[in-house]
Image (cartoon, helix red, strand yellow):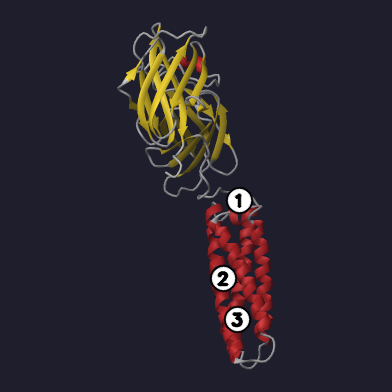
Amino acid sequence: MTTAAVLLVAALAALVAAGVAMVAEARGETTLRRIAVLRRCSVGTGLALGVAAASAGLLAADHLGSVADLVGTGYGRVVLAEAVLLTGAAGLWVVNHRRNLPLAERTLTPVRRVSWSQAVLGGAAAGTAALLAVVTPPVGSAWAGHVDGDLMLTGSDAARTATAEVGIAPGVPGPNTFTVRLGGFDSHRPIGVSGLRLRFEALDHPLGDAAGSGSGRSSELAIPAGSTAGPSSELALVPAGPRGVYRAQGSDLAADGRWRITVVASVGRSRFEIPLETVPRCGVRALPDRSAGLAARADLPGIGSLQASLTPGLPGPNEIRAAVLDPAGRPLALDSPPTVRISTTGHEPLALSDVGHPGPGQVVATTGLTPGHWRVDIAATAGGRPVHICFEALLPARPGG
């Protein structure tokens, strides 16, 4: 529930409570104390009406795209009914506050009668407000929660027409669910478009070299660094839920490495493109291990398997070990010493300089790591073929740290 909705409910509850209190207080003989209480209740009623009206206005501005939506949509008609009830309650408040309270020294009957009507209208407004929680608005909230995804991208087009949030789940090479939320650049309000699609371009390697890793398996390989971008692919998206949200599933994010994902769509006769760049998450996870701290084991299609560890798997100095095995389980001979890079959220990858290779297919390095998600990338060549493997690990915070 949004803040505006919470304020509306609270204000209407206060409005009804103040109306009931005025009815109860307006019984019996006129006294100075009774008149003072009625005046305080009237001021509280006015404040509650002001908060309720402002909250209802915020909800209308947030969820209605135009004035026509007031009568053309179910949500708009509920908002319109709420406005009518609040206007009626405000009119009764003016009558009570300006006319009936000055007469309270002679008679309390007009105050009591109008307060009853005010409480009834407040209750009706509360019931109408409850409908706003079950009726689907024509426009998703401009302040609604962001798109979810294990990999999140945001950007805007050069002409500042629109902004895009792209969520990719699970965010690893292979099949993924792509969710896009579009909004106006200035208004940030959700916008509807036509022909929305995502264009994928592999920046580190031709797509043909990575075709084997598009099957959803949890590893990446054979990525020749420095090669030109390969041919592009496109994925069409369809509306999903509130206005401005689109979704589709596809395997276009086919391999590890840098990718350019361009959001392409049209608004009326105008076409815009929002270019975004990302690197898929690694599909191999290091899990707690009694002997190594954190250990990762995974099949490497076309190569063999990976065995890796992070010891002790806690913040501070850690030893990174990895072994690449051939399909028969033997260490895979590498043509040259491998390179090891580590990276964490918000920081550029760091190449480790002191990397040992105690045996065929083996890598060992020591580095300091902080709490959080870390990714280890190992690049080498075997039999003249580029090989790229990776694994991710979560280092917990030290107890009491």
Rendered residue at 51%/34% (across/down): 150
Q: Which sits earlier in the primary sequence, circle 2 or circle 1?
A: 2
Residue occupied by mark 2: 48
Is residue 88 visible from the viewing direction of this image? Answer: no
Query: Quarter-wise, where is residue 4 in the image?
Result: bottom right
60 with respect to 366 (left or right): right
As rendered, which of 176 and 329 lies closer to the eye?
329
x, y (%) of residue 170? Answer: 53, 30
Residues marked 2 and 1 touching at CB (< 8 Å): no
Q: CA distance from mark 2 to mark 1?
A: 25 Å
Amino acid at dot 3: Val
Residue 386: image location, x then y, percent: 40, 12
Q: Nearer the viewer, residue 357 or 96?
A: 357
**Going by the image, does 174 lie left or right of 187?**
right
Q: Identify which amino acid the numbered label 2 is placed on.
A: Ala
Look at mark 3 in the image and give the residue it sits on. 95
Judged by depth in the image, the label closer to the viewer, 2 or 1, is 2
* Real-space CA distance between mark 1 and mark 3, rounded to the nearest whole angstrom: 35 Å
Query: Which element carries disc 3, helix, strand or loop?
Result: helix
User: From this viewpoint, which residue is outermost toward the left?
Assistant: 353
Circle 2: element type = helix
Check disc 1 and give the amino acid type. Answer: Pro
Sequence order check, earlier mark of 2 and 3: 2
Task: Please name the residue shown 50% across and 50% down the image.
Answer: 143
Q: Nearer the viewer, residue 203 or 294?
A: 294
Q: Dividing the image into 4 quarters, which one contains the C terminus?
A: top left
x%, y% of residue 174? 53, 23
Q: Which residue is mark 1?
A: 137
Circle 2 crowding by C-alpha within 10 Å: few under 14, some 14–19, many from 20 = many
Residue at figure coordinates x 57%, y 70% from the top left:
49
Q: Local crowd at mark 1 within 10 Å, few (<14), some, or many (≥20)?
A: many
The quarter of the displayed image where residue 85 is located: bottom right
